[in-house]
Image (cartoon, rainbow, N blue to C red):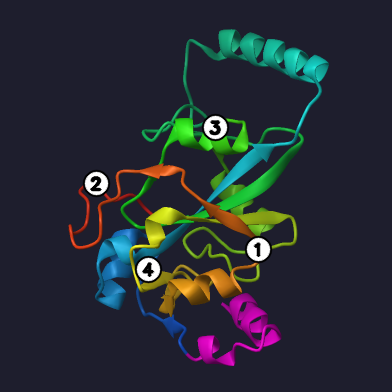
Amino acid sequence: MERCKEYFISKNASHLVERIREFDGSSATVELAAVRFNCNPAQIAKSLTFHQRKAMSKAEAKAHQRTLQKTQRQQQPDEGSDGVSASGATTGTPPDSNVVMIVVAGDAKVNTTKFKGKFFSPPRMLKHEDVEALTGHPPGGVCPFGVREGVRVFLDVSLRRFETVYPAAGTANSGLELSVDELETYASNLVEWVDVCEGWLPEGAGAAAGVTDA
């Protein structure tokens, strides 16, 4: 949380520091955060972190593909925690990659096809134990404020249907309310808006079933 506060102060946004709320209990998931803020779960702005593979030459790409195929054949008998998740995203730490943070609505899930179309690689989420070292924030408190310099931040269009949203504030028991315009203004290392999610409902349709964790 202190990292967020220092970042806001550096951006002459002390008014946002005053909005940060620290809770006695956890706000680490969409459901818990919605209870803490007494808001629509879809308004919780969850920050999802992925590895984006750096550009490779054709020769490097072919060699990498051969290595992947060999590894997949060797690991085929048992699928561990690095396998495909329910949303189609995989976990693990590939070499030569950048960190991408996508801030999405609480009822949105990343669409694998859309993600690959935008970032030219499948969605591969950061491992739980790597999140804080790579982003600057611990799991459950990840947000787009005061992130490490190498993290590229994107905002998903699923957030645009709301006037206000509720991201975390750097810890698993904190957050703040701000407008979507303020989110765009103060997000660190912001690149652009993207459309890489599915499952979210139009404004006024209510929260979607099967909301995923923040």
Q: Is residue 163 above or below residue 103?
A: below
Identify the image quadrant of the N terminus.
bottom right
| Residue to which mark 4 is pinned | 27
* Residue type pointed to by label 4: Ser
Q: Is residue 91 visible?
A: no
| Residue to which mark 2 is pinned | 210
Is 9 within the magenta?
Answer: yes
Q: Main secondary structure of the magenta part?
A: helix
Q: Is residue 170 above or below residue 134?
A: below
Identify the image quadrant of the C terminus.
bottom left
Q: Which residues are magenta?
A: 1-18
- In this view, the mark in front (2 or 3): 3
Residue at 51% from the left image edge and 71% from the top image edge: 183
Residue at the left extreme, as displayed: 205
> Residue 160, percent across and down?
39, 62
Q: CA distance from mark 4 to mark 1?
A: 18 Å
| Residue to which mark 1 is pinned | 136
Q: Is residue 147 left or right of residue 167?
A: right
Q: CA distance from mark 1 to mark 2?
A: 29 Å
Q: CA distance from mark 2 to mark 3?
A: 23 Å
- In this view, the mark in front (1 or 3): 3
Q: CA distance from mark 2 to mark 4?
A: 17 Å
Residue at 65% from the left image edge and 87% from the top image edge: 9
* Residue type pointed to by label 2: Gly
Q: Secondary structure at mark 4?
A: loop
The residue closer to the viewer here, 139 or 60, is: 60
| Residue to which mark 3 is pinned | 116
> Nearer the N terminus, badge 1 or badge 3?
3
Q: Is residue 25 left or right of residue 122?
A: left
